[in-house]
Structures are given as C-alpha cells and as structure tokens.
C-alpha cells in the first residue's frame, strides 16, 4: 500500500506529468490562437470575394449579397470552431474517431425524433435558394412584420420598426409578403365638402400632381387622381395613387396629404369637418301655427 502511495506521489511530483500538461496547454493555446487567426482570415477573404463580385461581370443584388455573405460567415464559424474542438479533444489522447462514429449514430437517432428541426433546415435552405426574402427586406411572415436582420438555416430574425427582434423557426414560415422587391403604391384619399366645386377641385389636384415629381425623388411616376372614390355623409372622397420606390409609399403618402391640404387652402376649396345642426321644438311649433 505504501509503495502505491509513494509511486503516486512520485508521478504527481515528477517532471513527466507536468511536461505532458505543459505541452497539452501549449497545444490548446496554439489551437485557440490558430482558430482566431483562421476565422478572421476566412471572414476577410469572404468579404473580399463578395467585393470583387460586385465589380465583376456576374453581379447579384445587394440584398442577396448581404444574405449569402452572412450565411457563409456563420457556416465558416461553425466549421472552424468544430474543427478546433476536435483538435482539442485529440490533445487529450481521446479516440476522436469513436466519438464521431458515436455522434453520427446518436445524431441519426435524434434526427428521427427532431422532425421540426429537419423541417426548419430544409425550409431555410429553400428560402435562401429561391431568394424568397433577403437581409434588409421588409417582410410580413407568421404574424410578424419588420426588417429581416438575419437568415439562417434554422431560424430567421425579423426586427419590427419599434425595435423588437422576432426569431422565427423557418419551418413556421408558411407565407411571406415581401414589400421590398417591387415598387410600392401610395394611396391617399382626399375629402371635399359637398358645397365645393368638384370639377374645380379636380383641376387643382391635377395641377398639383404634375408638380410633385420634381419635389420628391422617391416618386417613380406622376401621381394619378382616379376621381371620386365615395360619397360620405358630409364629404366627397377623391382618391390619389402614386407609384414610389420600394418601401417609400408611407413617406410619400404623408407628403402628398400635406401638399393637398396646403393647395386646397390656398385655392379656397373647403375640406369638410364634422358639423352638428340643432333644431328647437319651440321654433318648429311656431312655424306650424296657422296664420290668421
């Protein structure tokens, strides 16, 4: 018993153990430093690759470039870190081959149960492959509306205009409305009082619409006055539509409302407001009394 204890003390205090530990620590530090350098170098090469494609003959859209660039960088991170993890395990003289084989069998067994995960990955692949939406697009999906922050193989991140970031599993995205691909349409309804001259109001609005493209570069075409849209209880509703650059219809609609209000006031055309007419019963009785 004493001999075993002495041998243990000699092994712990001996140089062989500490040399082995020191070599292992140096190897781990070297692996971590190499991982950091390779990761930074790969990210820089990726950025340079997309920068060169921007100047080359085969160009891709900026929105698709941002999506692919972020996806490639995330994939590089996974590969580099996983490789570093395997190399660190190898420094401890572990049987990496057996671990990978066991992980493959376990992953296969887990895959049969993780159907949602598999569905998320497959759906994410087709979202990227078909370019359904890209980073920077304004979309509506799964009851969430906002700008796409990131697209991964499993999840997508959408940031609403109020700042919340929604993380959606790709498998739950069954329908997407993308507002950023094509031009938008601004719709503005203008109310005119019944007492006003409708034809004169149309002339004024036509003149104003012809002036707006010079003031607002986001307008693609001259706004169009469609005519009378409806007859309200106290107003005549006239509708204006304007084709704008993608995602600029809200700002342009606000600008058109301001321009219309200013021009109608200048021309003396009344915009209706709620009115309350009161009748006095006593006055009605006096009117109904027969005149002798």
Image (spheres, grey):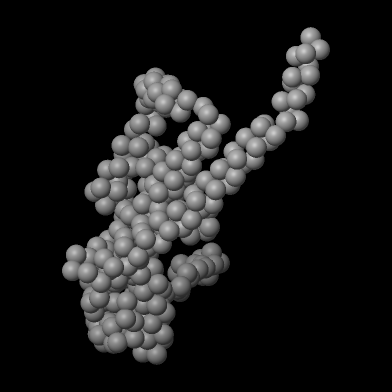
- Residue 125, position as x, y percentages in the image: 30, 42
Q: Residue furthest right?
A: 2
Residue drawn at (43%, 22%) of the image: 98
Q: Is residue 153 visible?
A: yes
Farthest residue, direction left: 57
Taking the image as shown, residue 194 lies to the left or right of residue 89, namely left
Horizontal side of 260 relative to 37 (left or right) equals left
Figure quadrant of the N terminus = top right
- Using the image as rendered, state which of residue 133 and residue 124 is in the foreground: 124
Q: How many marks?
A: 0
Left or right, 56 with respect to 11, comes to left
Position of residue 109 measured from the top left corner of the image (x, y, whole percent):
39, 19
Instruction: Report x, y in % for residue 288.
Output: 46, 67
Query: Foreground residue, 178 or 59?
Result: 59
Query: Residue 166 placed where, x, y %?
Result: 48, 48
Give me the residue at 59% from left, 38% from top: 24
């Amino acid at each position: 018993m004493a001999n075993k204890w002495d041998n243990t003390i000699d092994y712990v205090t001996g140089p062989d153990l500490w040399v082995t530990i020191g070599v292992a620590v140096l190897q781990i530090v070297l692996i971590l430093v190499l991982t950091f350098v390779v990761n930074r170098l790969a990210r820089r090469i990726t950025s340079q690759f997309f920068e060169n494609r921007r100047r080359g003959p085969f160009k891709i859209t900026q929105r698709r470039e941002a999506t692919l660039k972020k996806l490639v960088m995330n994939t590089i991170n996974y590969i580099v870190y996983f490789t570093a993890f395997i190399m660190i395990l190898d420094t401890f003289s572990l049987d990496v081959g057996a671990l990978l084989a066991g992980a493959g069998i376990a992953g296969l067994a887990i895959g049969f149960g993780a159907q949602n995960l598999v569905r998320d990955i497959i759906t994410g692949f087709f979202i990227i492959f078909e370019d359904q939406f890209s980073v920077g697009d304004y979309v509506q999906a799964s009851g969430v509306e906002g700008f796409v922050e990131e697209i991964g193989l499993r999840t997508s991140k959408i940031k609403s205009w109020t700042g919340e970031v929604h993380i959606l599993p790709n498998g739950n995205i069954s329908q997407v409305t993308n507002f950023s691909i094509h031009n938008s349409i601004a719709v503005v309804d203008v109310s005119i009082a019944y007492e006003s001259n409708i034809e004169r109001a149309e002339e004024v609005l036509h003149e104003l619409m012809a002036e707006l493209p010079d003031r607002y570069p986001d307008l693609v075409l001259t706004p169009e006055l469609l005519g009378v849209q409806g007859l309200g209880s106290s107003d005549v509703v006239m509708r204006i539509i304007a084709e704008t650059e993608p995602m600029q219809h809200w700002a342009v609609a606000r600008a058109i409302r301001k321009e219309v209000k200013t021009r109608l006031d200048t021309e003396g055309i009344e915009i209706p407001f709620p009115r309350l007419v009161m009748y006095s019963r006593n006055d009605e009785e006096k009117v109904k009394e027969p005149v002798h």
